[in-house]
């Protein structure tokens, strides 16, 4: 299948929130307490909310930069490609990459809204999260119907409120929400507790997909201060196996048989062995561990409830049958450093050598559209959804690589370490907000 004939739906991208997020959605009485962007004297931008500053505005949103400027930068909107935060430019960047539809995780609020959820004033937190969701649905996704899969954030300090927000979002057509891979790392009950049942039940009732992004638990997987940062970059996606195992062996998938969960940005190459091992463990140990899957294997239950996504994973594609062809989806990860933008179709085609067209279509768009209940063809005929058709709509997009003056973690010609990255982050986070 030629790259230009693909239809691409990305189930994991990221939005850098523009400064206007809370301009229209917050009730008047809360306007003075809304999160706001402050430009500091050093030229960097930070979100300020509830007396705290939240840099960086766009952690690792380095798309369009030269590779040597990758890192924890950028620190201001001036350093960003406009498509990271401007929805009109985002559509043009999607077009030039041949991407029909995109699901976008947040930046400033945290991957599942945790930065807002953790403030002490829970009334302010709830109002702010709702305003964010309404902005995301109405102003981001609503600007271009059929091009974005809406993703909601929840008041994760209270499962009952979470369930209520799931149902409110569902009425607005939002059928996906973000949750953490490790609630106990945030001081809450574990995935195995019945504490979360109002949330699980609401998602099961509404057909809402729970999206669990890597790093949404205890953060980046740093192993040692002097370890090369490449270590973290390598293991970060695979580390989601902890969450996968907890979910698979938990009561959640058994007690809520219609629940659906997406493992976001975790890759797929590790899944065949994971499922093989789970089936072996069940076969050898279920008599004394009292695990009951109702006559099914753990791998069967996984394929009924779970999907995973990949950016560039030839090994996973070669083992697609062992994973479950109906559980595999694709992601672009725009605008982060792992993204294949603007050559995603070409990168995918290398993975698809020898793969039948029926499997390609499932992986590139059919599984995602079915799983998220998203009708991408409602707003445009299918022939206009291909890579070639979309690229033809935005032929003038500037694809040149542009230096943004990023500050590398170290100027020394040696491997960048965990300590270097943490020092770079500390520099960004330590400065006091000052209006310039």
Image: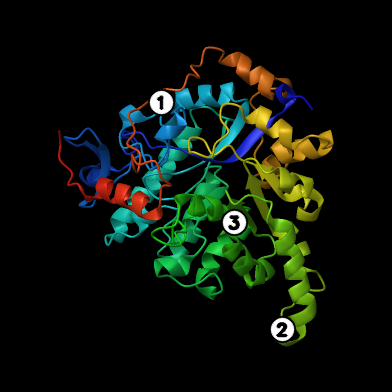
Residue denoted by label 2 = 290
What percent of the width, then of the height, locates residue 262? 61, 53
Residue 56: quadrant of the picture:
top left
| The residue positioned farthest toward the bottom in the image shown | 288
Name which of mark 3 and mark 2 comes first in the sequence: 3
Residue nearest the viewer, comparing 378 with 219: 219
Residue 66: quadrant of the picture:
top left
Q: Is residue 167 visible?
A: no
Q: Are marks 1 and 3 in contact (CB under 8 Å)?
A: no
Quadrant into which the C terminus falls? top left
Quick one: SS at disc 1? helix
Mark 2 vs mark 1, CA separation in Å:
54 Å
Q: Residue at x 72, y 25 (%)?
A: 3
Q: Is residue 40 left or right of residue 390?
A: left
- Front: mark 3 or 2: 3
| The residue positioned farthest toward the top in the image shown | 396
Q: Residue at x 71, y 22 (%)?
A: 4
Q: Is residue 332 left or right of residue 57?
A: right
Q: Residues within 10 Å of mark 1 (few under 14, many from 20)?
A: some
Residue 82: mark: 1
**How many numbered marks appear?**
3
Name which of mark 2 and mark 1 comes first in the sequence: 1
Quick one: SS at disc 3? helix
Q: Is residue 66 visible?
A: yes
Mark 3 vs mark 2, CA separation in Å:
28 Å
């Amino acid at each position: 299948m030629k790259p230009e004939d693909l239809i691409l739906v990305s189930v994991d991208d990221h939005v850098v929130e523009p400064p206007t997020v809370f301009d229209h959605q917050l009730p008047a009485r809360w306007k003075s307490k809304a999160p706001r962007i402050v430009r500091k004297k050093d030229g960097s931008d930070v979100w300020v909310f509830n007396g705290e500053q939240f840099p960086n505005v766009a952690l690792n949103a380095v798309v369009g930069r030269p590779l040597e400027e990758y890192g924890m930068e950028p620190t201001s909107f001036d350093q960003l490609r406009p498509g990271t935060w401007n929805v009109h430019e985002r559509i043009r960047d999607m077009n030039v990459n041949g991407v029909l539809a995109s699901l976008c995780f947040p930046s400033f609020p945290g991957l599942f809204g945790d930065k807002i959820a953790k403030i002490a004033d829970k009334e302010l937190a709830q109002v702010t999260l709702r305003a964010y969701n309404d902005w995301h649905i109405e102003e981001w996704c609503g600007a271009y119907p059929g091009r974005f899969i809406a993703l909601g954030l929840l008041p994760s300090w209270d499962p009952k409120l979470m369930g209520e927000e799931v149902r409110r979002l569902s009425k607005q057509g939002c059928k996906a929400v973000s949750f953490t891979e490790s609630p106990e790392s945030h001081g809450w009950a574990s995935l195995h507790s019945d504490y979360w049942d109002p949330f699980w039940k609401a998602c099961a009732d509404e057909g809402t997909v729970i999206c669990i992004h890597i790093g949404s638990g205890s953060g980046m997987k740093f192993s040692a201060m002097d370890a090369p940062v490449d270590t973290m970059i390598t293991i970060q996606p695979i580390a989601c196996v902890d969450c996968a195992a907890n979910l698979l062996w938990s009561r959640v998938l058994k007690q809520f048989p219609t629940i659906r969960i997406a493992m976001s940005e975790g890759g797929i190459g590790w899944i065949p062995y994971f499922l093989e091992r789970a089936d072996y463990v069940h076969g050898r140990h279920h008599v004394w561990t009292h695990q009951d899957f109702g006559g099914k294997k753990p791998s069967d239950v996984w394929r009924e409830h779970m999907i995973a996504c990949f950016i560039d994973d030839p090994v996973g594609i070669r083992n697609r049958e062992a994973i479950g062809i109906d559980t595999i989806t694709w992601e672009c990860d725009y605008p982060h450093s792992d993204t294949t933008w603007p050559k995603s179709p070409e990168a995918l085609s290398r993975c698809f050598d020898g793969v039948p067209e029926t499997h390609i279509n499932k992986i590139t768009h059919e599984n995602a559209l079915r799983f998220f209940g998203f009708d991408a063809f409602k707003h445009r005929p299918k022939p206009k959804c291909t890579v070639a058709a979309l690229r033809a709509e935005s032929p003038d997009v500037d694809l040149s690589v542009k230096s943004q003056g990023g500050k590398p973690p170290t100027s020394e010609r040696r491997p960048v370490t965990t300590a270097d990255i943490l020092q770079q982050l500390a520099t960004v986070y330590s400065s006091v907000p000052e209006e310039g």
